[in-house]
Amino acid sequence: VSPARSASPLEEPPEQQPVVLSTHSLAALKVGTQQIIPKGLASEIKVTSKGGGQNAETSKRVLKVRSMVESPSLPLVTDAEEEAEGELDSPGSLRRGLRSTSYRRAVVSGVDFDSSLNFKKKNRMSQPILKAVVEDKEKFASLGRIKKKMLKGQGTFDGEENAVLYQNYKEKALDIDSDEESEPREQKSDEKVVFHYKPLRSTWSQLSVVKKNGLSEAISQEERKRQEAIFEVISSEHSYLLSLEILIRMFKNSRELSLTMTKTESHHLFSNITDVYEASKKFFTELEARHQNSIFIDDISDIVEKHSSAFDPYVKYCTNEVYQQRTLQKLLATNPAFKEALSRIEAHEDCRSLPMISFLILPMQRVTRLPLLMDTICQKTPKDSPKYENCKRALKEVSKLVRLCNEGARKMERTEMMYTINSQLEFKIKPFPLVSSSRWLVKRGELTAYVEEPGLFSKRTSKQQVYFFLFNDVLIITKKKSEESYNVTDYSLRDQLVVQQCDGEDLTSSPVKNTSTMLYSRQSSAAHLFRLAVLSNHAGERVELLLGTETQSDRARWITALGRDRDRQKTDRTTLTQVEITRTYTAKQSDELSLQVADVVLVYQKVTDGWYEGERLRDGERGWFPMECAKEITCRATLDKNMERMGRLLGLETNV
């Protein structure tokens, strides 16, 4: 960075400045006149020679700080600094007038400062002032022309070097239900405070053109939130598109990586990700065009509805998920060359220290976020407006897309699992035709069974290990021989099962007589008991079992799975506890629920050893997850709005 120039006579002495930028702080000045800044704050561009006494050559290159976020309390440049703008510094240095641009403004790319500076030169005698926009909404159309004149080809989403990748993107519009302003109120200046600016992704209210024209203050708070939600769809699609581009360029097209695996493995790993990228690119292109046409966007529902019906590549990609995960796990475990090549690529600066798996799962994550974003727009649109009906149709289409993706992924996973389990079972009794397109695994695992055995003088109780495979319509009872081999000892249709929790005081009435003392002596191995009555097994006989699990949550999960929770439909959802997910969780068993950060879940059961059973608000999926991944929602208004959202997404009767 070029040396700091001496203070201009037009500038106030440093000690009189109410705000001290980090570049002017005492700590920074001790370092010297030259300071180091992050490389990401500057981008190298060509500057076209202009008239009016400027001596810049056409081929000369400079570094220019770019920003789409402006601080209202700090002028972009002073008059004295503008005088120096006609002369270009040497290559490799920042322009003098932009040297003190804040990190917050410099890190988010978008607005062309040339246009902004030229505008100010014409009004050199006065500082830039935010102009209020007349509240007449019929004049909003003129704002699009204002923006075109200001940006001159420089788009909001240009300058991708500083853009946020979708893995680090958090949809702010999903949190705009509060009555707080989108930007924090300006704090009182303090001479002793040094302001450090951190990189921020811009919201609609922070766009330079919105601020310059005072548009955010000229519309109602609800309409501002609606504009934020619309802009969120566009900006998040841009972020997502950047991440897909990195996935294809750095991983899929990597010759080094492709040489370490077969074509089949590569296909299972990346599937049709190129088609997904092209579909997303077309979607974003239309969204961006509407954004460029007018900064105040009337609606995007027609674009969303149109492209949702053309998102077939997403269904195919999500259907391949089971092959993708298995292939990646296999390659990492058995292919050292693949693992080494992958590590080198992941360490590349373009990947920003993110693993390949975080890129591979993005299409699944993106498709599940679209309904929530569209629902937020729907929520902020007046119900008596035609735009509300348009938004509801778009919401219906994206919800249908999510359902198709979930069903595709689930069907492939279930079919694969069914064939695998069937090959591992050895029937010692009459065989059962297990493989069926309408059958899937609900839960599997080992339990302790307590049974009576005849003794020399009296019957005695012993315990045996049994392994259950519970499907949606049948229970297969086995004894485990190895990790991949099981002997089938019994089976029963699921509607012939009756399950009941068994507390310690009920042991004397258990179907296995005189077991109380023995069971209490074995508390450490299986302290949590329940009864299972098989009304008719494979031989048409009634069988009663006393079963034990190692943890309280295991017992609750088995009772829930075996009992099919017949009272589920009778539960009033408005009375349930709601939690927000604070940490991503990936299901490890068939009865668990995979969750993303910011998901909302309705809790049906709480187990004291740290597990919840809940229903995911965005799609109605139900399963178990750790309590440590969630925090309880206590705000009554938020609880009610979540139920309203669930009603829109799932078409439920919420009684709200």
Image (tube, rainbow, N blue to C red):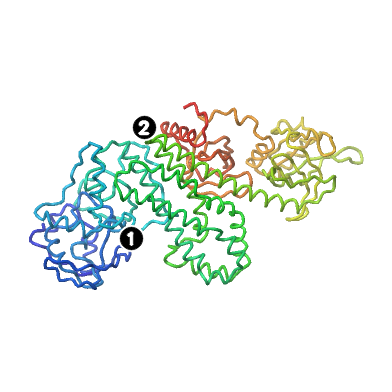
Amino acid type, label 2:
Ser
Is 388 left or right of 330, judged from the image as shown? left
Residue bearing mark 1: 159
Q: Are marks 1 and 2 in contact (CB under 8 Å)?
A: no
Q: Residue at x 72, y 47 (%)?
A: 446
Question: Which residue does the numbered mark 2 point to in the structure image?
Answer: 385
Q: Find residue 257 and report its image quarter.
A: bottom right
Residue 176 at least partly seen? yes
Q: Nearer the viewer, residue 256 or 448?
A: 256
Q: Quadrant of the N terminus?
A: bottom left
Query: x, y (%) of residue 11?
Result: 11, 58
| Residue name at image x 25 percent, y 58 percent | 112
Classify residue 35 by image quadrant.
bottom left
Q: Helix, strand or loop at disc 1? A: loop
Is residue 196 among the parts visible in the rendering? no
Residue 278 in picture, x, y percent from top left: 46, 57
- Direction top: furthest residue: 655
Which disc number belongs to residue 646? Answer: none
Q: Is residue 23 left or right of residue 5?
A: right
Q: Residue furthest right?
A: 456
Q: Earlier in the sequence, mark 1 or mark 2?
A: 1
